[in-house]
Amino acid sequence: MKSFDYIRPATLEEAIAAGSQPGASYLAGGTNLLDLMKVDVARPDRIVDITRLPGLDRTEMHDDGTIRIGALVRNADLARDKAFAAACPAVAEALLSGASPQLRNAATVGGNLMQQTRCAYFYDPHSACNRRQQGTGCDALGGDTRNHAVLGWSDSCIATHPSDFCVPLTALDAVVEIEGPEGPRDAPLSRFYSLPDEAAPGGVDLAHGELITALRLPSDAASFAGHARYLKLRERTSYAFAIVSAAAMLRMEGGVIAEARIALGGVAARPWRSVIAEERLRDAAPSADLFVEAAEAVLQGAEPSGENAFKIELSKRLVIRALQRAAEGTPERMPALPASVFASDTGVSDHA
Amino acid sequence: MPLSISLTINGNRHDTLLDDARATLLDVLRERIGLTGTKKGCDRGQCGACTVLVDGRRINACLTLAASVDGATITTIEGLARDGELHPVQAAFIENDGFQCGYCTPGQIMSAVGLIAEGDAGDDPERIREGMSGNICRCAAYPGITQAVLDAQRRLADDERVSA
């Protein structure tokens, strides 16, 4: 690990002044940054520790239905916040399906949004990686692509966004609140991560020195609480990144889907929301055929970026399963294995 | 520039001068304080061998900068036994054969103490296994570990009833 100066500012203003210096990097939970520093992928000259900044560790449930989550709220605390989990059960389930209890105790909301792809070639300084250093190429192309994109990729980068948390958040129209040297601004999470194009590998809509201060959910977020699920397929049932994951949320009115939200994780450089599929579901009664149509719509335009064509079919099946589970209703208690298809609350085993 | 930090570890205050900001909590515990019960496994947050409690919460000490937890209260495996008597979780690991080689055991035990304090798992073995999934055991003593956590949880609940 390269050496660095350590600074612990007391106020947001001091933090942004320090974080705007060349080579500075903000530190919160550190679960991703320290890891990246240990393998020399991240080499900051100065660490600006924001963990003591006041007022950023609260979750506020407002009377108008909007929810504001401070950037320093720890993942475990948010998932365990009863009022929040009741309003946004799919977000809580996504949080609890990510990482390990120890990591969730440390990792923060803002840090989760800022985590880097888990592409093995990004993590290896000896591999070519446009995302790590633009213009060097992409060793993932033609490499091991099991965890790589099938949507929205280009030859410059085929990496996926690894977050579980961000998948239902994107579907719920979450907004990122940002402070920076030029003042505060908001960014919709759906456009916070840019997709790669032929010239550039994609990245995060955050300028150097800017800092995420909170995440805001609009007033209708809780209207999906009765029919909300997050499902995640991975190499092992716990403590693994998604091969593909799906958030499905329905607002039901008299047996009809009044409004639907669908997003996939693990398939693109950002959580992949499908407004076309959501529109297809609107004002329709849940049925197997309808869910198949919706799944086809979500995966419209999907193409393998290597030996990962299986992820397209797998994604469709997961969308169908997630919609079925959402239609059945949110479980009263968080499943013992959050987001697992191997956990059944209906007593029916999903083991093939 | 050296950084001066203060940690309360297992009830004792330690004022430590860090000559390098890169020091993780794990390295400070092992190399500076001399508490080698906390193990370095992967050093990447993947195995859980370095699990300790920081202000009562289980975390990976290998992914925590020591400077960042300045002022915190830390509990390590060395801080669990009282007056020569094993903590109920330690005793339950021995009685339920919750280990083989023992390298992951301090992390497993600290994680179990954290899990029981969180109070989310109840007596469901599936929830215990999920709650312990951040601790890898290369010897695969998982059935014994699950039993030990369930057993320890019962003992701690009984102790609470007696003292209440």
Image: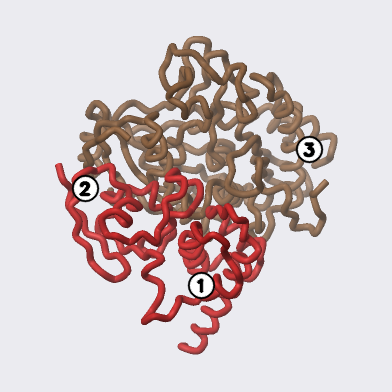
Chain B drawing hue? red
In space, the residues marked 2 and 3 are separated at their CA atoms by: 53 Å
Disc 1 is attached to a residue of which chain?
B
Are dots 3 and 1 on a single chain?
Answer: no
Mark 3 is surrounded, within 10 Å at the Cα level, by few (under 14), some (14 to 19) or many (20 or more) other residues, namely some
Return the mark for residue A284.
Answer: 3
- Residue type for callout 2: Ala
Query: Marks 2 and 3: which is nearer the front?
Result: 2
Task: Return the residue found at the far left.
Answer: B1
In space, the residues marked 1 and 2 are separated at their CA atoms by: 39 Å
**Residue at point 38% right, 64% down?**
B76
Disc 2 is attached to a residue of which chain?
A
Return the mark for residue B89.
Answer: 1
Sequence-wise, the earlier of marks 2 and 3 is 2
In percent of width and height, residue B71 lies at 25, 59
Mark 1 is surrounded, within 10 Å at the Cα level, by few (under 14), some (14 to 19) or many (20 or more) other residues, namely many
Q: Is residue A63 in view from this perspective?
A: no
Mark 2 is surrounded, within 10 Å at the Cα level, by few (under 14), some (14 to 19) or many (20 or more) other residues, namely some
Q: Which of A67 and B150 is in front in this view?
A: B150
